[in-house]
Image: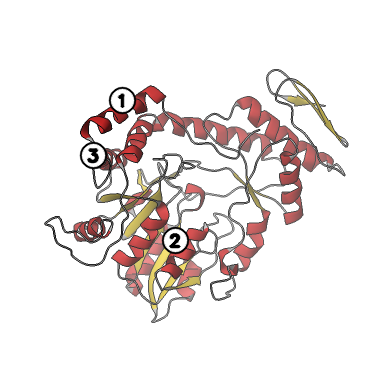
Amino acid sequence: MILVTKPSLPPKEKYEQYLAGIWDRQYLTNNGPLLRLLEQRLQDYLQVDGINIVSNGTTALQLAIRALDLKGEIITTPFSFVATTSSIVWQGCRPVFADIKPETLNIDPEKIEEFITPHTTAILATHVYGNPCDVEAIADLANRHGLKVIYDAAHAFGTLFKGESIYRWGDISITSFHATKLFHTIEGGALFASDRELTSRIQRMRNFGHNGTGGFDGVGINGKNSEFHAAMGLCNLDSFDNLLETRKRQHLFYYNQLNDLNLRFPETLDEVDWNRAYFPVIFDSENRCLQVKKGLERFQIQTRRYFYPSLNRLDYVDRQKAEISCNLAPRILCLPLYDELTLKDQMMITGIIRKILEKRPSQLPKQRSSAAGSISSCGLRVHVQSNGSLTN
């Protein structure tokens, strides 16, 4: 089976070296030495200030909202993972959905301004698939209207805008270090804030409000992460540059094989070097999207409808219009993308997609061969050569 994603893992021996130190120190969690080392290394690698590693990306979002003391309405995107919206609701605020730009799939700054009211306290935008929002336009809006800005940058590790980490933008940027992300600590996340007082506040809040002197300074939660997670992060950071180059090659191969079909792909802003964390394909209809999804599944190839449904349709939010997001969300499919995905796998995937879209078989393929040979299913027949290419 070809999975839609698979976590990258370091050599086991390298991880075990860190484990030996954990056993020797018997210091397992609560801001241990490996976690502090990982924070410092990430700060140096990303060239950012004020990092706090936490237990996961959703906790990071909730802490960001609480640390900025947000109330009332937060303008956000309907096209993101559910945690972007659920965190707003969880913290007692009201999400207000501004629609997205069809070219980038990111929140549209012009639509944001339409929804600003006296009750608006912040903008929470997502760098969709690691592709940056129009951060300059959003910063201008926020400054003119006195709003805070949080970026859900869960997908954006390694993405640069004008040569700098995208995490440098906003009052707070959060990220996820979940196992499915390009850089991971198995489970985890982080908050980035350049303001030192805000960074210190987040540090206290992730640890019950402890102020470091045995007392408490404000309410907090248990948002800490462990030495075992930090050890995985330290291992993975060493190989991240190579992983990023592999992902860019894989992304380019998909694009070159599919860009002459009746498909669209998200566009990026100028001066962006994005990490190609995902490979989303935009189809001309939901029916074609589902046809390709089911066809690939019959060859044991996973895909994901990411993000679906549009978040303005969740049953715990006020129903609001977001026509572009509602139109695009059912038509987007993310193709398999991970470090161990081979060129042969990608040739198989793109070959099947081409045959489905070009020949429009009445029935879709039923099985996938893992070796060279013929694959046949109800009018769709391909031959997998030893080099991975497909022919009739």
Q: Earlier in the sequence, mark 1 or mark 3?
A: 1
Question: Which quadrant holds the C terminus?
Answer: top right
Q: Residue at x 74, y 20 (%)?
A: 372
In the image, what residue type sits under mark 1?
Answer: Gln
Question: Which quadrant holds the N terminus?
Answer: top right
Q: Which mark is residue 125?
A: 2
Q: Is residue 11 left or right of residue 194?
A: right
In the image, what residue type sits under mark 2?
Answer: Ala
Q: Residues within 10 Å of mark 2 (few under 14, many from 20)?
A: many
**x, y (%) of residue 258?**
68, 38
| Tag 1 near tag 2, CB within 8 Å | no
**x, y (%) of residue 152?**
42, 56
Element under disc 2:
strand
Q: CA distance from mark 1 to mark 3?
A: 15 Å
Q: Residue at x 47, y 76 (%)?
A: 115
Q: Is residue 380 above or below residue 136?
A: above
In the image, what residue type sits under mark 3?
Answer: Tyr
Q: Where is residue 242, by image quadrant?
A: top left
Q: Where is residue 278, by image quadrant?
A: top right
Nearer to us of marks 1 and 3 is 3
Inspect this view and state whether residue 285 appears: no
Q: Earlier in the sequence, mark 1 or mark 2?
A: 1
Give the residue pinned by disc 1.
17
Give the residue pinned by disc 3.
27
Q: Residue at x 59, y 63 (%)?
A: 310
